[in-house]
Every structure is written in structure tokens, then in C-alpha cells.
């Protein structure tokens, strides 16, 4: 019994000696941990202010600020463990963190890909909330760029939710990057029309609706082909606009005004027709052969 008591006392004494000898290191560890905590809060606030000037996405700003503050806390924790001469514990933590990070990364590969893609989209200057874009077969106004998905509001007021990774990996068209866009209209007029008059009427009509000189652009007009039932042309003009709706409105207005101008000038816009000619002077045998050929 005395032997056991002696062993216990010796063990307690050794612990006490170790505690007393490590008191300075323990004090340093406590100070470092406390400082890292307050510094992390300061870093969090400073990072939010710095990032918010460039990124208007609140969730992204908070995520970056939290990552920055977490790095500061982890750095303080590792310094505190080093001060306590717990190198083996530190190595164990690093090894465990590496293995855990690998497992979590493999399990959440798709989610993490969308998250990082959302961060990249938030920093991109060529796509912002409020822009009118066309991507992945959808077109509409950008309503939200979240950490996991991208939200478009189409012209019919439907919301389209697209994974961020899909936006990054595929091309998109942003109508809002420029303040001007060019509209193209294709049309055909009858063969009996005077081509010079058609060109003049088209240019005068479109210039009266969309003043090209005011936006320092030039209207274009070209005949393209002799079609089956019409002589076809294209005309291209510029408008001030930043969305697909502006394009549709301008094209609709141009078509209405061109139709009115052509009607007023008796210019025909033909539709495809087929003329059947029956010649009564054909011999009976030739008519019969023709009928048999048609039946075959």
C-alpha cells in the first residue's frame, strides 16, 4: 500500500514540476490564442470593408471574411501548440486535417465546384446583377449570383436557376456590356417593284424611327438574292439598348413601320406561291402519259 502511495505522489510531483516549468510557455500560449482571437475579428471586419467595394454579393463577402479570420485563428492555435512543445500533437492535427480535407473534398466535389465558380463569377466584371445575358439556352436578367447557383429572370417572368459551374464552363452573351446593338431585318419584295425606290423607302423609314446620326452609326441595306417569289434583302440599323427586350421592341417597331410604308407605296411583300398551268393543246396520248407519270 505504501508503495502504491509513493508511486502516486511521485507522479503528481512530476506533473507539478512539469506544470511549473511550463508556466511561461503556457502563458505565452494563452496570450497568443487570445491575441489571435481578437486579431481574427479585426481581420474579419477589415476584409469585409475591403471586399465589399468590389463584390456586392453579401454571401461572398462574408465567406471570404470568415476564411480570412479562420486562417488567423488556426495560425494562432498552431503557434500556441508550438509554444507548449506539443510538436507531435501539431503533426497529428495537420495529418488529420489533410485526410479530413481530402475526404470532404471528394464527397462534396460538385458543391465545392459550384461554390468556387460562384466566387469567380462574383469577381467577374463582364457579368453583374441586373445584366441581360443569354447562356445555356436561356436569356434574361441576372437576378442573383449565389455561392451555388445563378438566377436568371426571363422575359416571361419565369426564374431559371443554373449551377454556377455550368455558367463558368459554357459561353454566355451579355447584352448589357455595350450601350448600342444592331438589329437585322430580312424581307422580300415583288419582282415588279422598283429596287431603288424600295431601298430609299426602307432607309428613310428606319432613319425616321431610329436616328442613326444621333448615335453616330450608319444604316445598311443590301439585296441578297432572287428568291422563288420575291427579291430578298436585309437591312441593319443601330439602337440604344442593353437587353433582349430592347432588341425585340425595336425590331417589332421597324417591321410595323416598313409594312405601312410599303403599303402606302404599293410595294408588294409576296408570300411563296405556286402557279399551275394547264395547256389544252397537248395531245391526248401526251396527257395520258403525263397523268400516269403523276400517279407514279
Image: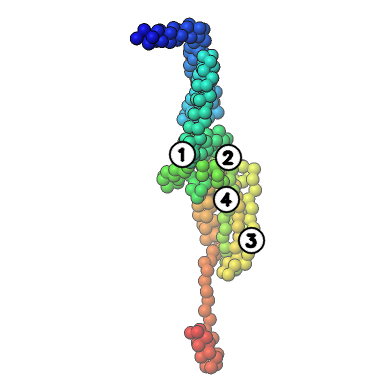
Q: Secondary structure at mark 3?
A: strand
Disc number for residue 223: 3
- The residue drawn where x is 50% and y is 54% is 256
Image side of residue 92 versus residue 211, left or right: left
Query: Residue 222: x percent and y percent?
Result: 64, 58
State the CA–CA distance, disc 4 to disc 1.
48 Å
State the CA–CA distance, disc 2 to disc 1.
38 Å
**Mark 2 Cα shell of 10 Å, populated few (<14), some (14-19), many (≥20):** some
- The residue singled out by tag 2 in the image is 177
- The residue singled out by tag 4 in the image is 183
Q: Which numbered disc flags the more N-terminal residue, 2 or 3?
A: 2
**Mark 4 Cα shell of 10 Å, populated few (<14), some (14-19), many (≥20):** some
Q: Which numbered disc flags the more N-terminal residue, 4 or 1?
A: 1
Q: Which numbered disc flags the more N-terminal residue, 2 or 4?
A: 2
Which of the colour schemes (rainbow, by chain, secondary structure, one colour) is used?
Answer: rainbow
Q: Which numbered disc flags the more N-terminal residue, 1 or 3?
A: 1
Amino acid at each position: 500500500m505504501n508503495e502504491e502511495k509513493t508511486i502516486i505522489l511521485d507522479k503528481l510531483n512530476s506533473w507539478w514540476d512539469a506544470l511549473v516549468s511550463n508556466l511561461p510557455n503556457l502563458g505565452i500560449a494563452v496570450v497568443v490564442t487570445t491575441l489571435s482571437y481578437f486579431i481574427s475579428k479585426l481581420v474579419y471586419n477589415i476584409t469585409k470593408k475591403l471586399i465589399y467595394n468590389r463584390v456586392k454579393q453579401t454571401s461572398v463577402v462574408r465567406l471570404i471574411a470568415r476564411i480570412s479570420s479562420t486562417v488567423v485563428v488556426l495560425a494562432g492555435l498552431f503557434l500556441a501548440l508550438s509554444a507548449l512543445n506539443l510538436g507531435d500533437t501539431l503533426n497529428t492535427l495537420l495529418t488529420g486535417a489533410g485526410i479530413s480535407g481530402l475526404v470532404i473534398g471528394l464527397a462534396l466535389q460538385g458543391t465545392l465546384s459550384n461554390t468556387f465558380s460562384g466566387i469567380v463569377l462574383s469577381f467577374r466584371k463582364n457579368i453583374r446583377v441586373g445584366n441581360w445575358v443569354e447562356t445555356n439556352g436561356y436569356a434574361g436578367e441576372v437576378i442573383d449570383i449565389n455561392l451555388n447557383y445563378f438566377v436568371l429572370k426571363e422575359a416571361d417572368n419565369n426564374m431559371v436557376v443554373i449551377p454556377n459551374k455550368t455558367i463558368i464552363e459554357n459561353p454566355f452573351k451579355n447584352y448589357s456590356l455595350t450601350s448600342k446593338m444592331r438589329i437585322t431585318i430580312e424581307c422580300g419584295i415583288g419582282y415588279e417593284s422598283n429596287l431603288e425606290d424600295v431601298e430609299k423607302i426602307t432607309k428613310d423609314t428606319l432613319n425616321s424611327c431610329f436616328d442613326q446620326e444621333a448615335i453616330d452609326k450608319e444604316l445598311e441595306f443590301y439585296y441578297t438574292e432572287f428568291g422563288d417569289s420575291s427579291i430578298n434583302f436585309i437591312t441593319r440599323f443601330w439602337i440604344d439598348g442593353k437587353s433582349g427586350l430592347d432588341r425585340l421592341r425595336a425590331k417589332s417597331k421597324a417591321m410595323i413601320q416598313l409594312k405601312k410604308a410599303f403599303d402606302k407605296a404599293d410595294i408588294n411583300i409576296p408570300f411563296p406561291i405556286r402557279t399551275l398551268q394547264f395547256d389544252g393543246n397537248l395531245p391526248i396520248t401526251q396527257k395520258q402519259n403525263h397523268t400516269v407519270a403523276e400517279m407514279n
